[in-house]
Structure formats: structure tokens, C-alpha cells
């Protein structure tokens, strides 16, 4: 499997989910073996780091990386799009503390990448070939990775809400991502909104960039019948992309979340 980059740069801009400010993110082509690097162009010296699990700082309602003054929040949807489309080398320029939430899914990134095109490079992708089952467990969350000849993911979510009980989503080939998963939006339950606002989160959240679920059902039309499960699968792809490698194996997760996902990612890197 060859490394890839985007053919030309593009910019997406909009409000951020948690900080509620407007930011712009520009994705640029990068040379072989660059990895996915993020540069904070609004900070002195324009510091940049590779998007890796060792920089995970907080995971409450999103994944945030930090190292000194450099930090990047809510990057999981962008990372999922890059990983699913095989983009292994990319320089990302961000002019604020958080990636814009856009419509709450990975779709805007997918459409932009497809519009500028993808260039295959000569170097091979760093691949972790799973040779024996590995299991992680934390509270109600679990993740198992088993040998397979390609990348495969299955996610099951369980909630007590009448509108969402147990849902499962399965991706057996990354080619499914664009049509079947990229449009799944970030979501929350109606009763969670006030507590999240009280702790300074979701300042930029709205029905334009999130799926809100009440006890009687969603407050806006679903894009998929099991959209919450599909979004959790999307998040898992984005979080595990912080390993910096392509995983050749089957991933089965139950009740995943950003904290659990990134803890698993760290253990994968350590192993």
C-alpha cells in the first residue's frame, strides 16, 4: 500500500463546536514520510506537531492534542476522513485552538479532498499487521483487534434513552466510508445540553452541526437509521488514526468514546 497526499491545498472555515469561535483550516500537500502534521499559524513561531496519540490532552466530548502552547481540539472528524481516503502525508494549517465543526460530520473534508484529488507517492505506508487478538477493556467499554487481511471495524453502542437503545454499525472495507459513514453527525441528548454549556463546552453547537436526540426522537431528520452508531465508528477511526500507522486487522468495539479510544491507541503504539 503506497503513501498518498492531496493534489492541492484547500481551506474550510466555520465556527468551532466547543470554543464557539470562527477558525479556518487549510490542508496542504506534503512529502513522503511527513505524516499528518498540524501547524498553529496564529501562534508565535507557528509551532507544529504530528497528529499522534502521545499529544492527547483531554477527551471530553472530543479529542484535543496539546504540547506547550500548541494545541488542537476536535480533530477526529478530519482525521477520520484523511485515514479513510488513504491520505498519509498532509500539512494542516490552523488559525485557532480548534478545528471548525462544519456540519458535524466528516463529509465536508471528504468532498474537499475528492475535489482536489489524491496523489499516490512512492514510499510504502507504515502498516501494523495484527497477528494475534488484542483486547482492551475499561468500564463498560471494550475493544478487540483480531487478525484480518484488511482494515475492518464494527461498533456497538448502548444507551438508556427511549430514542436510542442498542445500535450496531459495521464497516468491512474503507471504500464504504464515503457513502455509508462520512455524513454521520456528532450527537448529544437533549438533557445533556445545559450541563455541557455550564462547563464551557458546545458554545458553537446547534442543530446545523449536531444531531440532538430527545426522549421522543431526533430533533432533525436522521441521515442514517443508525446514525449515532455510525458516528461513533467514524470517531473511532479518527482517534485510532493517531497511532500514525495503517492497521491491518478487524476492530470490534462496544461503547467506545474518545477517552477509551485514545487510551487504546496509546497501548497500540506502545505494543
Image (cartoon, rainbow, N blue to C red):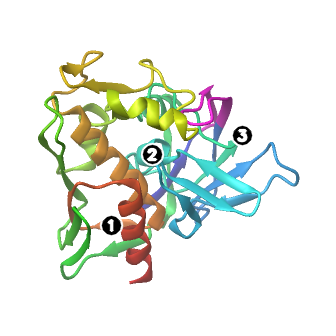
Q: Name the residue under label 1.
A: 247
Measuring 63% from the left and 50% from the top, which residue is drawn there?
72
Residue 94 colored magenta? no
Q: Earlier in the sequence, mark 3 or mark 1?
A: 3
Vertical arrangement, residue 137 with respect to residue 227, above or below = below
- Whether pointer 3 and pointer 1 mark residues with C-beta atoms closer than 8 Å, the reply is no
Label 3: few (<14), some (14–19) or many (≥20) C-alpha neighbours in 10 Å: many
Q: In this view, does 123 lie to the left or right of 92?
A: left
Q: Give the range drawn in magenta.
A: 8-25
Measuring 36% from the left and 61% from the top, which residue is drawn there?
261
Residue 1, given in percent of the width and then of the height, sits at 37, 63
Label 1: few (<14), some (14–19) or many (≥20) C-alpha neighbours in 10 Å: many
Q: Residue furthest top?
A: 220
Residue 22 colored magenta? yes
Q: Nearer the viewer, residue 48 or 178?
A: 48
Q: Earlier in the sequence, mark 2 or mark 1?
A: 2
Q: Nearer the viewer, mark 2 or mark 1?
A: 2
Vertical arrangement, residue 140 with respect to residue 225, above or below = below
Residue 144, given in percent of the width and then of the height, sits at 20, 69
Q: Name the residue under label 3.
A: 96
Residue 61, numbered circle: 2
Measuring 63% from the left and 58% from the top, which residue is drawn there?
31
Amino acid at each position: 500500500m503506497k503513501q498518498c497526499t492531496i493534489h492541492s491545498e484547500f481551506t474550510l472555515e466555520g465556527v468551532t463546536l466547543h470554543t464557539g469561535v470562527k477558525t479556518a483550516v487549510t490542508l496542504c500537500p506534503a512529502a513522503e514520510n511527513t505524516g499528518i502534521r498540524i501547524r498553529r499559524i496564529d501562534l508565535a513561531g507557528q509551532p507544529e506537531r504530528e497528529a499522534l496519540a502521545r499529544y492527547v490532552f483531554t477527551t471530553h466530548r472530543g479529542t484535543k492534542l496539546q504540547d506547550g502552547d500548541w494545541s488542537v481540539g476536535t480533530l477526529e472528524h478530519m482525521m477520520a476522513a484523511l485515514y479513510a481516503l488513504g491520505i498519509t502525508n498532509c500539512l494542516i494549517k490552523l488559525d485557532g485552538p480548534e478545528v471548525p465543526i462544519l456540519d458535524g460530520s466528516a463529509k465536508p473534508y471528504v468532498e474537499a479532498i475528492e475535489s482536489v484529488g489524491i496523489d499516490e507517492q512512492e514510499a510504502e505506508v507504515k502498516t501494523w499487521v495484527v497477528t494475534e487478538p488484542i483486547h482492551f477493556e475499561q468500564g463498560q467499554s471494550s475493544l478487540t483487534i483480531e487478525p484480518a487481511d484488511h482494515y475492518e471495524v464494527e461498533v456497538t453502542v448502548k444507551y438508556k434513552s427511549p430514542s436510542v437503545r442498542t445500535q450496531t454499525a459495521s464497516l468491512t472495507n474503507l471504500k464504504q466510508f464515503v457513502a455509508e459513514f462520512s455524513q454521520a453527525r456528532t450527537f448529544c441528548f437533549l438533557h445533556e445540553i445545559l450541563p455541557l454549556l455550564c462547563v464551557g463546552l458546545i458554545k458553537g453547537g446547534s442543530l446545523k452541526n449536531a444531531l440532538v436526540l430527545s426522549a421522543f426522537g431526533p430533533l432533525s431528520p436522521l441521515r442514517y437509521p443508525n446514525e449515532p452508531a455510525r458516528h461513533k465508528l467514524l470517531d473511532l477511526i479518527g482517534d485510532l488514526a493517531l497511532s500514525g500507522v495503517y492497521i491491518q486487522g478487524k476492530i470490534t468495539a462496544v461503547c467506545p468514546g474518545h477517552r477509551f479510544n485514545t487510551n487504546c491507541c496509546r497501548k497500540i503504539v506502545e505494543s
